[in-house]
Amino acid sequence: MIGRLANPARFMRFSAAVLPWLAGATAVCLGIGLYLSLVAAPPDYQQGESVRIMFIHVPAAWMALQTYLLMAVASGVALVWRHPLAEIAAQAAAPIGAAFTFVCLATGSLWGRPMWGTWWVWDARLTSVLVLFFLYLGYIALANAFDDATRGGRAASMLALVGVVNLPIIKFSVDWWNTLHQPASVMRLGGPTIDQSMLVPLLVMALSFCLLFAALLLLRMRTALNERKVRALRLNEVARATGEEPLPGAAVLSR
Amino acid sequence: MSGLSAYFAMGGYAVFVWPAYAIAVAVLGGLVAVSWRRYRASAAALREIEAQPWRRRQGGGE
């Protein structure tokens, strides 16, 4: 299926058909998730109502990691096979990942203040997630830093691959080092240690964030393909006006 | 304190819970708005350039 979709024209047709459904599913799931998190879920016996921050903080953190993983895999595919859609996917994912990471950091800070007594500590978990945020920003800056988009894309892809080393550091930071941050309570061997009444809202919110990510990714990839095609057609137009042969790459893209 | 005002007080954690949700809505909603606007602009630019006369003469476009 990935192979069939890897053709830009086919991708445009597929994404046009899927996007409205994805957007609708995101809205419905997010509505249910917000109701469960803000109304239905009980207050924690120790943390009281402040536990409601978890329902956005934890899914945002999961998405921050998963988006980076997807971006790194797509960057690897772009570097090895030079597939045009792979780089477009990675560059479309980066701002979404940065947004999720920012939400994770900000909500974590708002949760840390009442629970830990501090907005921020320079411990392993918090610092490694901050590094993840800067990796996203560095990737976006690098991809746009060159006049030649191909060179920028390759440099950014390499940064994305090198940055993968940060993912296990984030995941295991709570086990490897002493930190204020609690260890994993859902994604752990032996099953979740969190009560059903809180696990269900958490998973519904996680699903909503996944759907939102997929919808945004397709939308941003479609935008990038449109913009690429417009650029190619403009180049072609200039070539015609000056009496030169149209660029072969432009001809392929405008087909 | 009862009913709605008790709910909005979030057991004394209102100043932490509501800003957390507000930030999430602002950041993710903002990204959706920016992405959607840029998508509309890109689609309009493509329609415009594909409607140019020199392309129609050639039978270009899709």
Image (cartoon, rainbow, N blue to C red):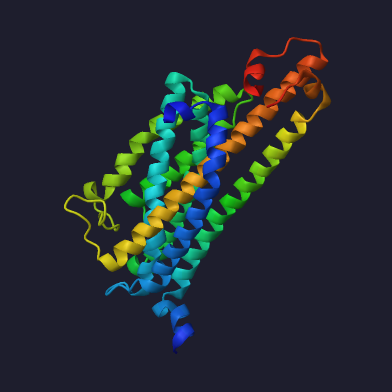
Side (left or right) of A46 relative to A15: left
The one nearer the camera, A180 or A225, is A225
Q: Which quadrant: the N terminus of chain A?
A: top left
The picture quadrant where one finds residue B6 is: bottom left
How far across and how far down the image is residue B32, in percent? Answer: 57, 51
Q: Is residue B59 visible?
A: yes
Tell me what residue is drawn at x 46 percent, y 27 percent: A4
The one nearer the camera, A171 or B31, is B31
Count how many numbered circles sit on residues in the image. Answer: 0
How far across and how far down the image is residue A48, in percent? Answer: 33, 75
Position of residue B58 relative to residue A172, above or below, is above
Position of residue A150 relative to residue A119, above or below, is above
Tell me what residue is drawn at x 56 percent, y 35 percent: A13
Side (left or right) of A168 relative to B41: left
Side (left or right) of A185 relative to B9: left
Side (left or right) of A180 relative to B24: left
The one nearer the camera, A87 or A179, is A87
Q: Which quadrant: the C terminus of chain A?
A: top right
How far across and how far down the image is residue B12, in percent? Answer: 41, 79
Tell me what residue is drawn at x 55 percent, y 26 percent: A152
Residue projecting furthest to the bottom: B1
Residue projecting furthest to the left: A190
Position of residue B9 relative to residue A253, above or below, is below
How far across and how far down the image is residue A9, in percent? Answer: 57, 28
Tell me what residue is drawn at x 41 percent, y 40 percent: A68
Q: Is residue A142 visible?
A: no
